[in-house]
């Protein structure tokens, strides 16, 4: 797939929550696509997208299926100040908010869920039944997408 032809889809679940918050899911998909076309350098060229990587669990067929990218803090002034300092220095930006997604080289990207601060790290650590259930649901969504491009949520 050529960088300019990256396909980015958004789950209905994420679209609904974005609209409820007054955000446009199509704009998020477009900005995510633009950011991903920058490759690894995108982490340092975009204000809105920070550290990007895979979650190590849950796994499907022994492999990670979920990726996440750190997003700017929205409610913690000190965390936002740190994010902005890292942005000015063009260094790695981290936060406790993350956009969770799946990727397949045939089907592109599927934006699944936006974990708002301060929940992203506790969700990913899966230390309680609710976070285990959510992360497994996200992994099931990702697995279906990776398998045949189906968007099930």
Image (cartoon, grey):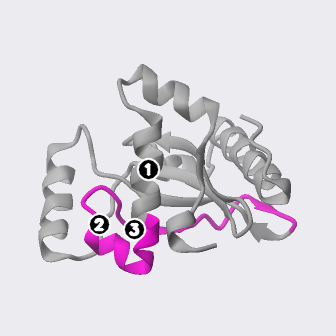
Give the mark nearer the N terminus: 3 vs 2.
3
Give the mark nearer the N terminus: 3 vs 1.
1
Residue appearing at x 79%, y 54% in the figure: 143
Q: Which residue is mark 1?
A: 30
Residue 94 in the figure: left or right of residue 127: left
Magenta segment: does it hold 54?
yes
Residue 93 drawn at (x, y percent): 29, 66
What span is in magenta?
A: 36-61
Q: Which residue is mark 2?
A: 93
Q: Quadrant of residue 147?
A: bottom right
Residue 145 in the figure: left or right of residue 135: right
What distance separates the C-alpha of mark 3 from that of mark 2? 6 Å
Residue 127 in the figure: left or right of residue 33: right
Q: Residues within 10 Å of mark 3 (few under 14, many from 20)?
A: some
Q: Residues within 10 Å of mark 2 (few under 14, many from 20)?
A: many
Instruction: Say which element carries label 1.
Output: helix
Q: Residues within 10 Å of mark 1 (few under 14, many from 20)?
A: some
Along the viewing direction, whichever of 153 and 129 lies nearer the viewer: 153
Instruction: Say which element carries label 2.
Output: loop
Q: Which mark is residue 15?
A: none
Q: Which mark is residue 51?
A: 3
Q: Nearer the viewer, mark 3 or mark 1?
A: 1
Q: Nearer the viewer, mark 2 or mark 1?
A: 1
């Amino acid at each position: 797939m050529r960088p300019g032809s990256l396909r980015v889809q958004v789950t209905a679940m994420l679209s609904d929550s974005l609209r409820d918050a007054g955000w446009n899911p199509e704009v998020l998909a477009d900005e995510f696509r633009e950011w991903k076309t920058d490759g690894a350098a995108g982490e340092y060229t975009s204000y809105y997208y920070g550290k990007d990587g895979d979650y190590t669990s849950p796994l499907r067929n022994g492999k990670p299926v979920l990726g996440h990218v750190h997003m700017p803090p929205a409610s913690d002034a000190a965390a936002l100040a740190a994010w902005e300092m890292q942005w000015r220095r063009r260094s790695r930006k981290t936060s406790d908010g993350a956009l969770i997604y799946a990727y397949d080289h045939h089907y592109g990207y599927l934006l699944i869920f936006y974990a708002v601060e301060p929940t992203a790290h506790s969700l990913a650590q899966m230390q309680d039944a609710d976070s285990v259930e959510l992360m497994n649901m996200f992994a099931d969504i990702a697995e279906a997408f990776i398998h045949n491009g189906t968007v099930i949520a």
